[in-house]
Amino acid sequence: MIKKFLIVFLVLVLACGVSLAEDAVTSATLKIDRLPAVEAEDNGILVAYFSPDDTTKAAAYAIAAALHAELFEIEAAEPYTADDLNYMSSKSRSMTEMKDAAIRPAIAALPEDLGKYDTILLGYPIWGGQAPKILYTFVESVDLSGKTVVPFCTSNSSSIGSSAVNLQKAAGEGAKWEKGGRVRKGDNAEAIAQWITEIFVPAASEQ
Ligand SMILES: Cc1cc2nc3c(=O)[nH]c(=O)nc-3n(C[C@H](O)[C@H](O)[C@H](O)COP(=O)(O)O)c2cc1C
């Protein structure tokens, strides 16, 4: 009987551990260590983000929670390792990609039905002052025509700078790009929610 109880207890502890690990994020710049709950409504807003080190993911969840938006993670077909993200080495994968204007890292999967969204908030980390090349893969692979795109980034210190304008150029015409901005260093989920509602007001049909 005691043995049975112990087994059930162990299974419960393990199950809890796994789900906590999934919710936990480590963020270099944001004060978020647990992803906020997102209650998505069918309001035509998607938060699509790339976040190999989880900081932009934390920002994306805070934004999606505030806007009741759906979430989509842009994942690399070949995930980035810690070595790949070493920006101190000019030979690392990330730095090599940023030097190659033509490179377009493959995405694991694109969103199934982008047609149901009017607005896409597009999040990414700043790499060498720009959006990672996989964002170019994304904007060149999906049909953004008729949509509003709101870019946002995280970084150690750089602003969004020319990163969004360059992505917009790569995406071509047809979408309305908002100015967007950088999620501020040190912000928590509440501050990010406040910020996004200041810089982006969803159209009446999306509320
Ligand atoms: C390859 C690489 C280049 C980076 N370049 C910059 C930069 O130019 N300016 C900056 O402020 N931060 C830079 N960073 C830091 C990231 O922008 C920052 O840590 C970001 O929040 C990481 O987001 P993530 O956790 O979603 O991957 C760089 C990071 C990497 C991996």
Image (spheres, rainbow, N blue to C red):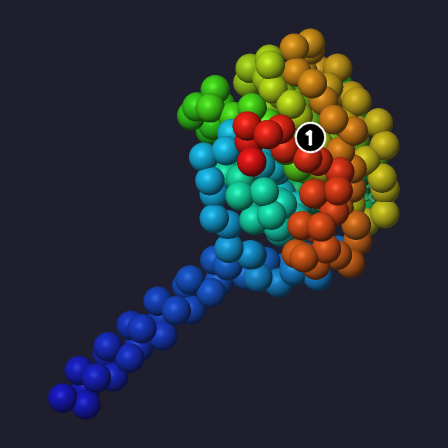
* Quarter of the N terminus within the rendering: bottom left
Residue 110, position in %: x, y?
48, 26
For label 1, the residue is 150
Residue 44 in view: yes
142 over 34 or under it: above or below:
above
* Quarter of the C terminus within the rendering: top right
- Residue 36 left/right relative to 88: left
Between 65 and 83, the one lying in front of the other is: 65
Question: Which quadrant would residue 134 be assigned to in this image?
Answer: top right
Amino acid, disc 1: Val
State the residue lying farthest toward the left.
1
Q: Residue at x 25, y 84 (%)?
A: 6
Residue 131, position in %: x, y?
73, 31
165 over 26 or under it: above or below:
above
Ligand 1 resides in the quarter of the picture at top right
Local SS, label 1: strand
Between 186 and 83, the one lying in front of the other is: 186
- For label 1, the crowd category at 10 Å Cα-Cα, with few meaning under 14, some 14 to 19 and many 20 or more, is many
Q: Residue at x 46, y 40 (%)?
A: 41
Q: Residue at x 48, y 62 (%)?
A: 21
Residue 150, position in %: x, y?
69, 30
Between 183 and 201, the one lying in front of the other is: 201
Question: Which quadrant would residue 164 be assigned to in this image?
Answer: top right
Figure disc tally = 1
Between 55 and 150, the one lying in front of the other is: 150
Residue 91 in view: no
Q: Residue at x 60, y 19 (%)?
A: 147
